[in-house]
């Protein structure tokens, strides 16, 4: 691969992740085969302090920037994609709490962030719901008023690292809010009665992430665990905060692509097929494909690292477009690298004695992180012209919610 320029802090974080990656790689195939969660990896991350990678220094963490975290997580993924992706959901949630604190948009973010850091809690959750295409605009999970807070009822899917979570981060719709239907963003302890994990994650790729279905059955949500409240069908700055998540997740897939590339280079350099006297690396079809893999990885890094570095510099609306494009390129390029990798290795790529088939399955999971490629290109095209294209069904629900707010607004 190409030489990369890193700051001294970035080198420290990358080397930190590399030590864990070497350890995790020894168990990655077993956890994948058995679809078991890597609890021992999480224990190691806690004990070394890596779990506090992007926690603010004021809270006892390392205070890694978005770019620093992305570079470290790429390296961690080289050892175990499932561990890197799962713990990235923790880092994503820490980033959102930190941004809420810094921007002063939540009265409880600073306290919750400090508590999570002090107790070394694992946090994360899910906003995805079965059968709901507008989960960020109007969740189907319901919050109903209860003394001291709300009761939550609903279902979330793709709840990565579920079995290791101490607190669950998600959203619910409060239909009976005084000023019209509202979305509540919350962080609730997983020990709260009524939270259940189905342990139903049995997937093709990322099998060790424990991304189980989560159900809420009359789960009590205390006032002090609500981070944000906004009207349904409004962004309230939340989309911009969430925009760091898919960007950061993409680094995991670049790491997987790099692991596959490095394995193949070593494999082709060492192998010979008589009567050929030279290694398979001398074959033109092998060289060309490895060369394309290098170019794809370098391009993915370039756009992803650039977007991460400019997070705090760009206007939110411009950065959101840039981040969406960078995430798409990183995912598609990483996927293409594995397609090429299987062609380079030939039939051996199907053997579970080699890591390629596992990495192939893991990297394909990236194609389904929202927004997918078609959604991204549509979003970029619409926003280029300053357009929106709401589905008639969505527009109807939004209009009904708006109508319920008008009387309250008229009285204000």
Image (cartoon, helix red, strand yellow):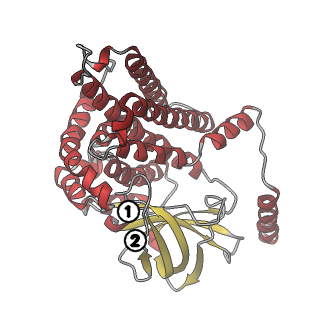
Q: Nearer the viewer, residue 255 or 104?
A: 255
Q: CA distance from mark 2 to mark 1?
A: 7 Å
Q: Nearer the viewer, residue 401 or 269?
A: 269
Instruction: Please tell me which residue is depicted at 26% across the width and 22% down the height of the picture.
Output: 273
Task: List x then y, in percent, for residue 244.
Answer: 48, 43
Q: Is residue 70 visible?
A: no
CA neighbours of label 1 inside 10 A, class few (<14), some (14 to 19), many (20+): many
Q: Would you say 180 lies left or right of 84 here?
A: right
Task: List x then y, in percent, for residue 129.
Answer: 58, 65
Q: Are marks 2 and 1 in contact (CB under 8 Å)?
A: yes
Q: Which mark is residue 199?
A: 2
Image quadrant where one finds the C terminus: bottom right
Q: Nearer the viewer, residue 56 or 233?
A: 233
Q: Would you say 315 lies left or right of 394 here?
A: left
Q: Which mark is residue 195?
A: none
Q: Nearer the viewer, residue 363 or 188?
A: 363
Task: List x then y, in percent, for residue 369.
Answer: 53, 48
């Amino acid at each position: 691969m190409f030489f990369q320029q890193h700051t001294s802090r970035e080198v420290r974080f990358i080397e930190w992740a590399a030590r864990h990656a070497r350890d995790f790689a020894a168990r990655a195939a077993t956890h994948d085969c058995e679809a078991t969660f890597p609890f021992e990896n999480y224990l190691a991350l806690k004990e070394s302090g890596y779990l506090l990678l992007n926690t603010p220094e004021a809270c006892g963490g390392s205070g890694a920037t978005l770019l620093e975290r992305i570079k470290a997580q790429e390296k961690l993924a080289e050892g175990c994609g499932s561990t890197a992706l799962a713990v990235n959901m923790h880092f994503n949630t820490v980033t959102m709490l930190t941004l809420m604190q810094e921007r002063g948009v939540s009265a409880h973010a600073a306290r919750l962030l400090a508590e999570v850091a002090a107790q070394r809690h694992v946090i994360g959750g899910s906003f995805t719901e079965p059968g709901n295409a507008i989960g960020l605009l109007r969740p189907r999970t319901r919050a109903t008023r209860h003394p001291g807070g709300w009761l939550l009822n609903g279902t979330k899917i793709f709840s990565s690292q579920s079995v290791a979570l101490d607190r669950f981060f998600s959203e619910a719709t409060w239909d009976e809010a005084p000023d019209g239907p509202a979305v509540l963003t919350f962080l609730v302890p997983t020990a709260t009665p009524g939270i259940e994990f189905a342990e139903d994650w049995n997937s093709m790729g990322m099998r060790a992430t424990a991304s189980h279905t989560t159900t809420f059955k009359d789960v009590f949500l205390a006032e002090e665990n609500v981070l944000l409240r906004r009207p349904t069908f409004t962004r309230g700055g939340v989309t911009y905060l969430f925009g760091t998540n898919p960007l950061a997740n993409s680094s995991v897939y670049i790491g997987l692509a790099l692991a596959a590339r490095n394995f193949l280079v070593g494999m082709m350099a060492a192998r010979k097929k008589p009567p050929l006297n030279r290694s398979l690396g001398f074959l033109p079809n092998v060289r060309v494909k490895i060369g394309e893999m290098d170019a794809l990885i370098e391009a993915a890094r370039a756009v992803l690292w650039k977007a991460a570095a400019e997070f705090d510099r760009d206007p939110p609306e411009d950065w959101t477009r840039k981040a969406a494009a960078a995430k798409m390129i990183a995912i598609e390029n990483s996927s293409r690298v594995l397609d090429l990798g299987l062609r380079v290795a030939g039939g051996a790529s199907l053997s579970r004695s080699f890591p390629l088939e596992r990495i192939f399955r893991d990297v394909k999971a990236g194609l389904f992180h929202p927004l997918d490629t078609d959604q991204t290109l549509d979003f970029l095209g619409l926003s280029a012209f300053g357009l929106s294209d709401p589905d008639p069904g969505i527009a109807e629900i939004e209009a009904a919610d708006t109508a319920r707010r008008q009387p309250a607004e008229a009285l204000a």
